[in-house]
Amino acid sequence: MVSRLRTGFVWVTALIIFGFLFYEARRASVSLESAEVITGWCLLCLMVFLALFNIRKKLSMLPIGKAETWLLFHTAGGVLVTAVYWLHVGNLWPLGLYEQLLALLIYATVLTGVFGYVIQRTYPKRLTQTGVEVIYERIPREVSELRDQVEDLVLECTEKTESETLGRHYVDTLAWYFRRPRFFSHHVFGSQHGRQWLRQQDAAVRRYLSDDEKVYLDQLIELAEYKNGLDTHYVYQGVMKGWLLIHVPLTVALLVTSVWHILLVHIYAL
Amino acid sequence: MVVALESAPQRWDSPFDPDLTDEEVSGLLNTSAFLTVDRDLFPAHTPFEGILKNDTRIVNFHAGDIVVREGDYGNSAFIVLEGSLRVFVGNEGPEGLLGRQSINKRGVFSALSQLFSNSHIPEVRDTRNYGTQNLREGRQDSDAARVFVQDIPAVLDEFRTAILEEGAVFGELAALGRIPRTATIFSETDSVLLEIRWQGLRELRKYNEEFRRQIDTRYRENALKVHLRETPLFTGLEDDVLEQLVSATLFETYGAFDWHISYQKMRSSGRSGPEHEVPIASEGEYADGLLLIRAGFARVSVNYGKSNRTVAYLGAGQHYGLRALYDSWKSSTDVALGSSLTALGYVDVLRVPAPILEEHVFPNISGRPPTFVSLDDRSVSDDSLLEWSVDERFINGTQAMLIDLNRCVRCDDCVRACASTHGGNPRFVRHGKTFDHWMVANACMHCADPVCMIGCPTGAIHRSQVGGMVIINDDTCIGCGTCANSCPYNNIRLVDVRSRDGSLVLNPNTQLPIQKATKCDLCATNPGGPACVRACPHGALSRVDFQPETLAEDSP
């Protein structure tokens, strides 16, 4: 775990860098120099540095520092980039069309970064609370095996109790639930709708069942609860993996458009 | 469903060699090694002939065959019946004979080159390095496969060796003390050896005075003094006092050597916990000596409710009973032990008698020895992680992969980092037993008691000289699976190896795929230590030592 001291050091360093840039920009402005050149190049350097975090992940074989430390710099750097961007453009939203595209990309990249930061600090705890631990890629197989297990249970119930009540209820409602991960949007926001839906299905059919059938229903609900845990993992792990598929391409697009922006500026404006 | 057996399982239900005949046993009784043994001293339930029949086997070695290898762990001793053997003196021996891997740390550029050299085909190997050892007989059978010295005269000329002839006993200290073999021994001529498994050794030592004296003398001469000297409690003692201590100390072993097998069975039948473990000392009894743990692990527990509550666990070098002994000496009344000590698997214990402590040690102790952490300030919940780690035997791990699930975002960066440093093949599974928000992943824990190393026929799995990690030499592994079957934590995997074009590499004799044992090697050849730890962006993954020093500092 990165120590508080190191965390504090990184944030203070980011603050000092911003203070220095702010001072330099003011000084350049007063001296009728182009402050945007200083802040612009600093901004590019910062963005390249942030993008290097992804490269570092590919270079795990090299002793180039812990990824945890890199993430700390990445987070502080992300905040610094936002501040330096505002310093660079002088307002929150620029006027030119191309500049607006750049602003859109930088805001989208930062916002996806913030989103990633938040979910990475909230989802793991929620996953632990499910009491289930499963590897993401194995979830479809787990669901499939669970479905087979449940169907065997329902068939056994029908054969042993000579009653179709639970079987019909399964076919009518629960089969839908066991077919694949469900309640995606509810899980994303931490809602317990899946569990509540299960309770409802349990209560709906229980009154029509004999004591023997209720034993099977209890087992079925237990498996359904486990499935709810799998669904939670499917959604949370999927989101935690998926947000990078937006954040990283946005970063690449931002870097490319920024380089083009610099070329244009140096060719036509300076 | 409950199945009733006709009789309870007995120790001799599975003889060491089921094919050993009564005639061969009679022949053994007449060998010089056993002529002087007084059979009347053995009890009716464990007759001497029974030990020979069930706990021994006759093994034939060809000239040049390696019998034991320095650094290996073994669970049996040997008696030379015919022929002569040679032991390498002073850690010498031909290079490559041990089947070990010399760890050469990669440079930065070499490490970086893995980025391009790693194959997308799983388990690709350069098979040119295979077959560097001279291997005799079957390649898939750990019992049959033997590494041998090819040119014995040249080896004898080049290296210093000592001879072992008929009647010589070797390997008993390693087998009884759960310590690595200290020398490499090979058969100089065709030889016949009697191999005695540890259970039989223990019985022989128990009932045969001569055998016990022989083993104890060797241990006292070779290791005990050093061991006691290294024990903090005795570091300040004069040499003559230490000699007295050495001669008075008793050796005891508890639990089963193959605890990993019985432990798995116990777990699957739901019989785990202190009440199912072999007792060493019981709460309420009076201590007659200080118990020093020499090898293995023991659980300290107290009666709590209807069960026992774990207070701490002790590993090699720690001791038990000091507080009760000191209080007895100080108050001149018998003070009972405040806790019980049970064997977690195989435990090798040294018992230092109380009188010698009272005479030479206690007068030099300033203040009452500390006790284990008081239960008054710890709830059952506080101790649940300790109970779990002991029950699961994770205390054996020195580099267990512990993942904080409250931090882990399941990104698998650790798995990818592992693969990137191992030719594209991850050497662990990010899955394992969980407790609260902790997971011990299926990665080699580099155990204090590496049961996986027992029985490797080629010495491929070994403890590295530098760093002490348990590693497998891929070139000399024959894929027999002995290590994978022994690992109680399922952290070793057998894989089918492939050539660079992706086709399976086949054994030319059997036409079956060649397998290799694989596991975490702590990135032994890579710069910067375990890549998995460095790769975790959230600091969720760490390699931890489950040794007990953080849990208990002294005895009750």
Image (cartoon, rainbow, N blue to C red):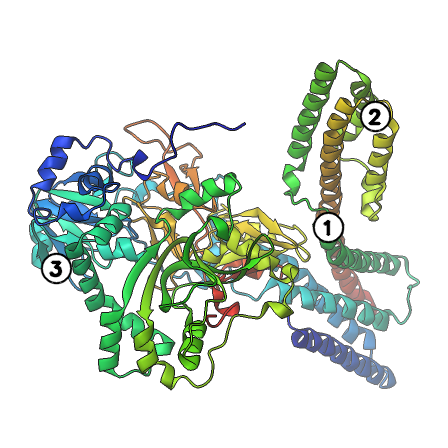
Secondary structure beneath label 2: helix
The lab-note entry on whether marks 1 and 3 share a chain reads no
Q: Quadrant of residue A71?
A: bottom right
Front residue of B161 and B344: B344
Q: Amino acid at mark 1?
A: Gln
Q: Amino acid at mark 3?
A: Phe
**Position of B409 compared to B321: left or right?**
right
For label 3, the crowd category at 10 Å Cα-Cα, with few meaning under 14, some 14 to 19 and many 20 or more, is some
Specify the quadrant that holds the N terminus of chain B: top right
Q: Residue furthest right?
A: A95
Residue at position x 61%, y 57% in the image: B384
Residue at position x 47%, y 81% in the image: B368
The dot on residue A173 is: 2
Q: Amino acid at mark 2?
A: Thr
The Cα–Cα distance between marks 1 and 3, rounded to whole angstroms, is 62 Å
Residue assigned mark 1: A129
Label 3 marks a residue whose chain is: B
Residues tagged 3 and 2 counted as in contact (Cβ below 8 A) = no
Q: Residue furthest front?
A: B333
Residue at position x 79%, y 35% in the image: A182
Secondary structure beneath label 3: loop
Front residue of B269 and B479: B269
Secondary structure beneath label 1: helix
Front residue of B12 and B176: B12
Against A184, residue A246 (above or below) is below
Q: How many marks?
A: 3
Q: Nearer the viewer, mark 3 or mark 2?
A: 2
Residue assigned mark 3: B159
Q: Residue A108 appears at what percent x and percent y?
A: 82, 56
**Position of B534 compared to B210: left or right?**
right
